[in-house]
Image: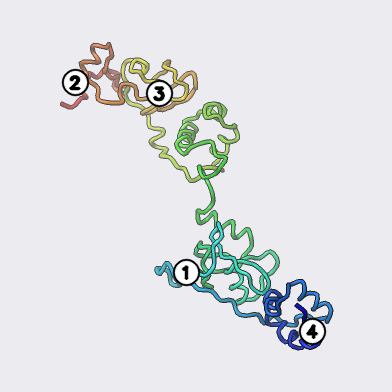
Amino acid sequence: MYIKWSEKIDELKDKVNFFTNAELSKYYGITSNDIRTVFARYNIKRTSTHFKPLKFRYERIREDLEAPCKICISHHKTKRGYILVRHKGKRGSLHSLLFREAFGPLKKGELVRHKCDNPACCELSHLEKGITRDNVNDKVYRNRQTKGTDVNTCILTEESVKEIKVALFRGTPGIILSKIFKVHPATISDIKKNKTWKHISINVNAALKKRVWHYVQNPGQYEISCDKCGSKEIQWSEYEKCIWCPKCLIDTKGTMGIFDGPIPVGACEVMGISLDRWDMINKRVIKPSEYIKK
């Protein structure tokens, strides 16, 4: 399409400060490259940025707040939940563009943060400026960071971490725990120093509660085995609900054995299994008739 620019140059100069190159190219039916060529040929430069105001539709959520969140519904969200728009020839986050229009440009290294932790929110009272370190601190303090089993490279589970913390409280060496759970010793050290898995807590009193009785026979006689290595050459631990495995050198829960269900006393006698208990405090044997409720 041929345009006689010598006749339209005044019209173009009037429009240049109010429309983007894409809008001008669409208006004149030419490409954006052609528009830039005309600018260079006639030495046209923008002297101001009176673009059309940014418009979007929104809805309000979280009415429990003093100023409810203002969520944009006219634009698509990214995978991270932010709203991306193009305005004044530039592409950026909607909340950041609105903040800069209301409070002025940001300095180098500054960014716009959400007080409400809602990335799609555009309510100005929910926005504040800061730096990357502030944004990271917000993520940590508000418990939004990826942690535990949500990390792709995670090997341990929450249950195994609880076992490790209990074993560390009982004085088990970290090098032994690293071999049992098949992780690097530094991983156990970080757990011990509370550098990692901080969100997993244990009941220290329950973990260190001493046993007051045990059955008179060894745990292997009751088909109990180590849940780590499967060995039946085990002993009763000094801690409640635990057995001691000499092979693993650790106090562990062990398997349930015959205690996985109801225990018929008569059948135990036939199998040669004694249900007598040894009272570690009074140093005497307790018969089943004394502790089994009728």
Q: Nearer the viewer, residue 10 or 253?
A: 10
Q: Residue 200 location, x and y as percent?
A: 47, 43
Badge 1 amino acid:
Cys
Q: Nearer the viewer, residue 240 or 88?
A: 88
**Mark 3 or 1, which is nearer the eye?**
1
Secondary structure at badge 4 equals loop
Q: CA distance from mark 3 to mark 2?
A: 25 Å
**Mark 4 or 3, which is nearer the eye?**
4
**Mark 1 or 4, which is nearer the eye?**
4
Which circle's residue, 3 or 1, is located before the other in the chain? Answer: 1
Numbered mark located on residue 49 in the image:
none
Numbered mark located on residue 4 in the image:
4
Badge 4 amino acid:
Lys
Circle 1 residue: 69
Secondary structure at badge 3 equals strand
Q: Residues within 10 Å of mark 1 (few under 14, many from 20)?
A: many
Numbered mark located on residue 243 in the image:
3
Badge 2 amino acid:
Ser
Which circle's residue, 2 or 4, is located before the other in the chain? Answer: 4
> Residue 211: which quarter of the image?
top left
Instruction: State whether residue 149 is above or below residue 171.
Output: below
The C terminus, quarter of image = top left
